[in-house]
Image (cartoon, grey):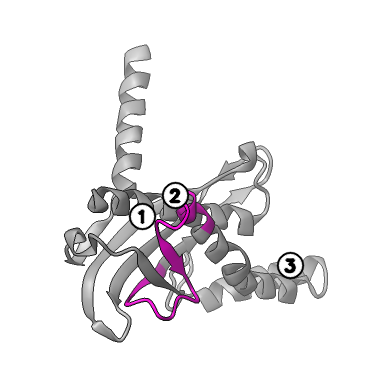
Amino acid sequence: MKKQVLVFALILATLTMYAQKPKTIEGKTKNLKGITSYNLEFDYSDVQIPKYDSEEEFLEDKMAKREEKEAGTGEKFKESWFADRENRYEPKFKESFDKRFDEGEFNVSKDNTEAKYTIKIHTTKLFAGYNVGVWRQNAEIDAVLTIYETENPSTILWSGKYSKVQGAGAMGFDYDSGYRISECYAKLAKEFAKMLKKVSK
């Protein structure tokens, strides 16, 4: 029995590690060598929500369920769903990225408009997960990161897809969906920074 558990744990660990490695779509990572300044852009267009045909359908469903319980909470959910992007996900990405490097080693920010290159983070799938006490599931995102010349977006240095990037935190007390999702962006930044470190050596 112990052997079976060990085998299962090794398989799970392998899958988790594999899931965090980006799949190159275009270009080569070696093209990023020596670049230390990037403009940062986030894109949530056409994001897929598991079990729903569209983000709009997801919002309609979640809003209706909340309105049934308490009037006005549906609209509040919709507002926070979009506000969390700028207020939580994006700052969490930058915070997680920055702490992987020495101060001044990399300049990556949304307002770095003079940077020659831009990193676009396109979230293609978003699963909020859940935590209802006894049962919980991590939030998860898929994202395509594309690095291109700021003045000429068609000149792509590298583009890669990160799949099944999961976020969890607060020792399992992550009852807020926005918090869980923000941890996905922290993990994404960690893995991306790891790749840049490897490239810069």
- Which SS class for mark 3? helix
Q: Which residue is mark 2?
A: 102
How many residues crowd mark 2 within 10 Å: few (<14), some (14–19), many (20+)?
few
Q: Which residues are magenta?
A: 95-123
Going by the image, does 175 lie left or right of 21? right
Going by the image, does 121 lie left or right of 199? right
Please report contact status of discs 1 and 2: CB closer than 8 Å, yes or no. Answer: no
Closest to the observer: 178 or 37? 37
Position in image of residue 111 (x %, y %)? 50, 76
Where 63 sits versus 176, above or below? below
Please report contact status of discs 1 and 3: CB closer than 8 Å, yes or no. Answer: no
Q: Is residue 121 visible?
A: no
Q: Residue furthest top?
A: 2
Queried whether the magenta region covers residue 6, the answer comes back as: no
- Quadrant in which the N terminus is drawn: top left
Q: Is residue 143 visible?
A: yes
Q: Residue furthest right?
A: 70
Q: Determine which of the numbered discs, if any, sits on residue 192 in the image.
A: 1
Position in image of residue 104 (x %, y %)? 45, 58
Amino acid carrying label 3: it is Arg
Q: Determine which of the numbered discs, if any, sits on residue 25 in the image.
A: none
N-terminal-most mark, 1 or 3: 3
Q: Which residue is mark 3?
A: 66
